[in-house]
Image (tube, grey):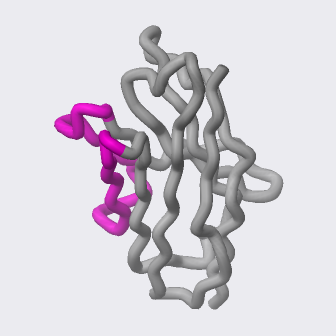
Amino acid sequence: QVHVEESGGGLVQAGGSLSLSCVISGRSGRGIGVGWFRQAPGKDREYVAAISWSGDSTYYGDFVKGRFTISEDNAKNMVWLRMNGLKPEDTAVYYCARQGSDYRYDYWGRGTQVTVSS
């Protein structure tokens, strides 16, 4: 099985920064990459960013506009999401997910709450 665990959420003022981390573990392996998603109350889940374990491919949702940076540590099976210039509309539960060899996001963490106050 695979275990996915996020950490690093919290409360921050608008304009502030937070770093989220995600660790992938388990016997089924870490897949080919990791994605971050978010879901705000009453809204659909939204794609935030993704990275391959090789580190040479990163992807971002359109709303990010240079504010977020995704990075990885191969040795630790860990991925970070650095979020700068946070806005109240970034308030959501942020989820990390493993991307399997079929490119599907197949294992998900429980999420970490990010709240941005105005």
Q: Which residues are magenta?
A: 52-75
Give coordinates of residue 75: x percent, y percent.
Answer: 32, 42
Looking at the image, residue 78 lies above or below residue 7: above
Farthest residue, direction top: 102
Farthest residue, direction left: 56
Quarter-of-image position of residue 51 = top left
Quarter-of-image position of residue 55 = top left
At 31% across and 40% down in the image, what residue appears? 74
The C terminus - image quarter:
bottom right
Residue 42 vs residue 88: left or right? right
Looking at the image, residue 70 lies above or below residue 118: above
Quarter-of-image position of residue 81 = bottom left
Q: Nearer the viewer, residue 60 or 28?
A: 28
Give coordinates of residue 48: x percent, y percent.
Answer: 48, 49
Total tally of numbered discs in the picture: 0
Q: Nearer the viewer, residue 98 or 44?
A: 98
The N terminus - image quarter:
top right
Residue 71 vs residue 25: left or right? left
Residue 37 vs residue 113: left or right? left
Looking at the image, residue 89 lies above or below residue 42: below
Q: Nearer the viewer, residue 65 or 109?
A: 109
Determine if the magenta segment contains residue 114: no
At 33% across and 48% down in the image, what residue appears? 72
Determine if the magenta segment contains residue 54: yes
Farthest residue, direction right: 42
At 50% across and 57% down in the image, what residue appears? 21
Give coordinates of residue 89: x percent, y percent.
Answer: 61, 70
